[in-house]
Image: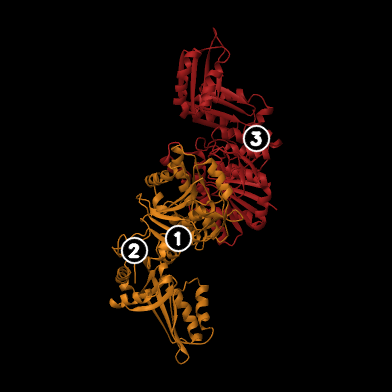
Chain colours: A red, B orange
Amino acid sequence: MNIVVQKFGGTSVRNLECMKQVLEKVMVPYEKGNKVIVVLSAMAGETNRLIDLAYEWSDTPDLAEMDSLVSTGEQVSVALFSMLLKDRGIKARSLLGFQVPIKTDSAYSRARILDIDRDKIEEMLQENDILVMAGFQGCDEGRRITTLGRGGSDTSAVAMAAAIEADVCEIFTDVPGVFTTDPNICSMARKLDHVSYDEMLEMASMGAKVLQIRSVEFAKKYNVKVHVRSTFSDEIGTYVTQEDKNMESVLVSGIAYDKDQARVTLSKVKDEPGVSAALFTPLAEAGILVDMIVQNPSRDGRTDMTFTIPRGDLKKTLEIIDEIKEPMGAQDVLYDQHVCKVSVIGVGMRNHSGVASKAFQALRDENINILMISTSEIKITCLIEEKYTELAIRTLHNTFGLDKSGSDENSL
Amino acid sequence: MNIVVQKFGGTSVRNLECMKQVLEKVMVPYEKGNKVIVVLSAMAGETNRLIDLAYEWSDTPDLAEMDSLVSTGEQVSVALFSMLLKDRGIKARSLLGFQVPIKTDSAYSRARILDIDRDKIEEMLQENDILVMAGFQGCDEGRRITTLGRGGSDTSAVAMAAAIEADVCEIFTDVPGVFTTDPNICSMARKLDHVSYDEMLEMASMGAKVLQIRSVEFAKKYNVKVHVRSTFSDEIGTYVTQEDKNMESVLVSGIAYDKDQARVTLSKVKDEPGVSAALFTPLAEAGILVDMIVQNPSRDGRTDMTFTIPRGDLKKTLEIIDEIKEPMGAQDVLYDQHVCKVSVIGVGMRNHSGVASKAFQALRDENINILMISTSEIKITCLIEEKYTELAIRTLHNTFGLDKSGSDENSL
């Protein structure tokens, strides 16, 4: 049994006309004799409407009730889409989280998938040619409805593809695939034919909104072949797969950026054991995601600590620091909201040195000052002043030969 | 464990303000130490919105998908209402059809309840003081969502009350209870303190919209004490219960009417075996509900057949007759849309004669011509010209002493 999983987001199913376009996409693998599992999001705007409703009712809506509430969005989509299929005489049915079941833990609003009953799915695929599954939702042990967090439909689709060992998981979106960088900033950006799970993870964590980060983790873990492609054309998009020889020959796959950053510096902090914990524990407890951290070498028993956080958390962060700066002995608290992270990403870096220095040189040549640096095995990230974002991206894109249309290779 | 079931319709939960009023109603039994099961409908207008959506998508929406679609209406209500309860610090949770589960057959859009898991409910009532159950919905053996038909939330509430042996099932509505007749037509109409299941069934089948007819059947079968009362006041409404001695002393409990009627006559039909079947079988197959039927005594081997149907089915009925009238040998087809059924209802009739003749005399005294008559053990129904409806109701109401405020007795 050849099975294709296809996922369509809220924009793709926002009204009847759009759903009819989705129907044509679904017909492609169906008419080739595949069984198809279609995963749908709520119609665009619906999830927000339901969330707004909840906040009208309560300032702190109960999370379990919230999940049950917002899951109705997908329930509506799959019922309506299944009606279209039935009208075409296709053996099809809708499938809700509790019907599969998509078993999750009970972390309402951000549940994790524990198990999908493969036998049940196969049984339903015997009776149906197309299953229309509600994305984003699952069901915990007590039969309560859970949701997987924003963008969770990607994860639903990939998890289903993993469970059923589908041939491919097609994620339809409003862009033609994964690009070397943001085409809105760099007109030379090219669509990638292939990208590895790890590269995709780095790009996703940098705010590239093509795929939910957890869906990529899932795909990597279960080796699901993901095909990111456009709802609005029939062209091949980008395959997200395990890295292969071919990919490693490519030094850099893309340039990512994230403007949602703020930098905070505590100067002249006492350099003694426990100081980092004193700072970062209360931030973590407040749910603030600290990203880059730099601690300067100590001088006279004092050091400067600098870190970045999401811009929206700056106020809360400063409030927390206000309470702890005295025991830490901090002299000053400095912050800057006009910063941006720019990253050079590529699995090829694993086997090549010199990428970092080449990146730094390129930025220096444009007089772009690097405020902070962090690196991983396949990524080099520089924090720069926000105003240089576009220039830095175009420069790095050009430096690593990503402009070269048709070529998937670039060199030092 | 004392348990009270309370059911609130769509108007009662149509927005936040209304839900807060419902909350106060729920607090009454809760604060007396009862466990409460609240059954809610969809917010007013929501079910129709979803049905309209379905018909935008398909001229003949798949019924199973339709049920899954419209059941989201109740899902939204119960989630939002539970949020209010949680905010008050009350141990409460929402409960969907598949979570109870309310097991039904698979007759989508008009499913019948087969079983409710009492142990599961009791378990949940150990952990919660209030359960907020979605009305109207259930779940079949294959875990698909079913609905119980329009007004099905009444049935949900009564079925739950039966399963859990609740002390009372309170049906909150926009009227203060069950009346001797429609107060909009007869200003002398009085609220009844008690009415029997059988009387309520006859009233409901005559279009009295206070309770869904199936919920009354359910209440009768399981002897559930139903209390119909107003959402907008704290006054006692009407108890619907088994008949007792006291009720039998009351001759007539109410006057009901139904304007949604049309009368059709086939004249000079061959009076031979199989003629009735030839007429009524195709009508039944077309789903047309034939109500009163009168066949005149035969003359010269020919007879007139007259029957009533819902007014909206007249066109379809005439089309069907057009095809069969020739083989039946019918000479003429006559019809009249301007007719109305008026009924005198009361369990006391069982033990008293003379009610019918008294009713006929009263109508004759007002020069109201009776077009057709049908009777049951506790009901006398007359078909009259529609224009006399109000006059007939007021006359009968007065004739049987229903005007007498404070008195529950009336005599021949």
Residue marked by disc 1: B212
Q: Residues within 10 Å of mark 3 (few under 14, many from 20)?
A: some
Residue at disc 2, secondary structure: loop
Instruction: Identify the image quadrant of the C terminus of chain A.
Output: top right
| Foreground disc of the pair 1, 3 | 1
> Which of A270/B165 is in front?
B165
The image shows residue B98 at horizontal and vertical percentages of: 56, 51
Q: Chain of mark 3?
A: A
- Asked if badges 2 and 1 are on one and the same chain, I answer yes
Label placed on residue B21: none
Residue at disc 1, secondary structure: loop
What's the CA distance linking mark 2 and mark 1? Answer: 17 Å
Residue drawn at 57 percent across, 15 percent down: A274
The image shows residue B182 at horizontal and vertical percentages of: 34, 63
What's the CA distance linking mark 2 and mark 3? Answer: 84 Å
Q: Which amino acid type corresponds to the residue marked 3 in the rendered image?
A: Glu
* Residue B20 visible in the current orientation: yes
* Depicted A237 relative to depicted B279: above or below: above
Disc 1 and disc 3 in contact, CB within 8 angstroms:
no
Label placed on residue B182: 2
Q: Which amino acid type corresponds to the residue marked 2 in the rendered image?
A: Asp
| Foreground disc of the pair 2, 3 | 2
The image shows residue B68 at horizontal and vertical percentages of: 53, 54
Q: Which amino acid type corresponds to the residue marked 1 in the rendered image?
A: Gln
Label placed on residue A409: 3
> Which of B170/A14 is in front?
B170
> Which of B347/A344 is in front?
B347
Q: Chain of mark 1?
A: B
Disc 2 and disc 1 in contact, CB within 8 angstroms:
no
